[in-house]
Image (cartoon, rainbow, N blue to C red):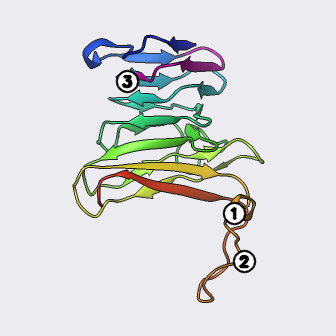
């Protein structure tokens, strides 16, 4: 486990290096946002956030679930390869994804027109992996936040029956929340 109650950054001057959560179920906790350079998840069990967390280099999920809960994991590296995982997009069982609840999100800075794959999913209600591919229309600096919600949208106030008549059926099993945090693209 990791706990940061320092009132400041955990690592001085964005020190390059990799922090590896390599045990069983582990948590990143504290009263202060932790800024990791590279963060790697290995070992076994779900890795859980109990505080907002930043990764400045690469977030390597490997085959682990990163459960942000109501917090966010923010990847500030704008490379579209800054989030890695071992599982393919159709791997069974699902390997390497970020789950969130409430206001929790996976945030990522972008600065190109490349496709950014947000590996989001959930291990509740039977579990699902539904990554989001975002392709900004220009290379301006932007930040997006994504969350996969593994329940009927109607339960959260998004009535699937209230839709434009020209639209087909709306999925009643899950939905995704996508927010633009900063930028104009």
Which quadrant holds residue 78? top left
Q: Tell whether 79 sits left or right of 68.
A: left
Judge the density around disc 3: few (<14), some (14-19), many (≥20) Cα neighbours within 10 Å.
Answer: many
Instruction: Name the residue that disc number 1 marks.
Output: 157
Is 55 part of what is drawn in magenta? no
Residues under labels 1 and 3: Cα distance?
A: 37 Å
- Looking at the picture, how far across and down is residue 111, in whole percent? 25, 49
Instruction: Name the residue that disc number 3 marks.
Output: 38
Judge the density around disc 2: few (<14), some (14-19), many (≥20) Cα neighbours within 10 Å.
Answer: few
Of 183 and 44, the residue lying toward us: 183
Q: Tell whether 3 sits left or right of 33.
A: right
Front position among marks 1 and 2: 1
The local secondary structure at tag 3 comes to strand
Name the residue at 69% across, 63% down.
157
Is 25 part of what is drawn in magenta? yes
Query: Which segment did they paint magenta?
Result: 22-34
Judge the density around disc 1: few (<14), some (14-19), many (≥20) Cα neighbours within 10 Å.
Answer: few
Label ID, residue 161: 2
Residue at the outermost right position: 125
Which quadrant holds residue 176? bottom right
In the image, residue 138 sits, relative to residue 22, either above or below, namely: below
Q: Quadrant of the C terminus?
A: bottom left
- Looking at the picture, how far across and down is residue 164, in whole percent? 60, 84
**Residue 43, visible in the rendered structure:** no
In the image, residue 90 sits, relative to residue 172, either above or below, namely: above
- Looking at the picture, how far across and down is residue 158, in whole percent? 66, 66
- Looking at the picture, how far across and down is residue 135, in whole percent? 35, 59
Name the residue at 55% across, 20% down.
28
Residue at the outermost left position: 139
Q: Quadrant of the N terminus?
A: top right
Front position among marks 1 and 3: 1
């Amino acid at each position: 486990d990791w706990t940061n109650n320092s009132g400041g950054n955990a690592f001085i001057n964005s020190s390059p290096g990799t922090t590896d959560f390599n045990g069983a179920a582990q948590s990143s906790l504290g009263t202060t946002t932790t800024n990791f350079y590279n963060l790697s998840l290995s070992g076994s069990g779900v890795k859980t956030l109990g505080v907002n967390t930043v990764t400045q280099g690469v977030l390597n999920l490997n085959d682990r679930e990163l459960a942000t809960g109501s917090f966010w994991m923010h990847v500030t590296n704008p490379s579209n390869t800054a989030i890695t995982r071992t599982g393919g997009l159709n791997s069974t069982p699902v390997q390497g994804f970020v789950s969130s609840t409430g206001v929790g999100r996976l945030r990522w800075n972008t600065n190109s027109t490349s496709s950014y794959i947000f590996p989001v999913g959930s291990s509740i209600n039977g579990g699902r992996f539904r990554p989001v591919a975002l392709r900004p229309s220009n290379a301006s600096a932007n930040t997006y936040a994504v969350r996969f919600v593994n329940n009927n949208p109607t339960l959260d106030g998004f009535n699937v029956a209230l839709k434009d008549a020209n639209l087909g059926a709306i999925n009643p099993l899950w939905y995704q929340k996508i927010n633009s945090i900063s930028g104009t693209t």
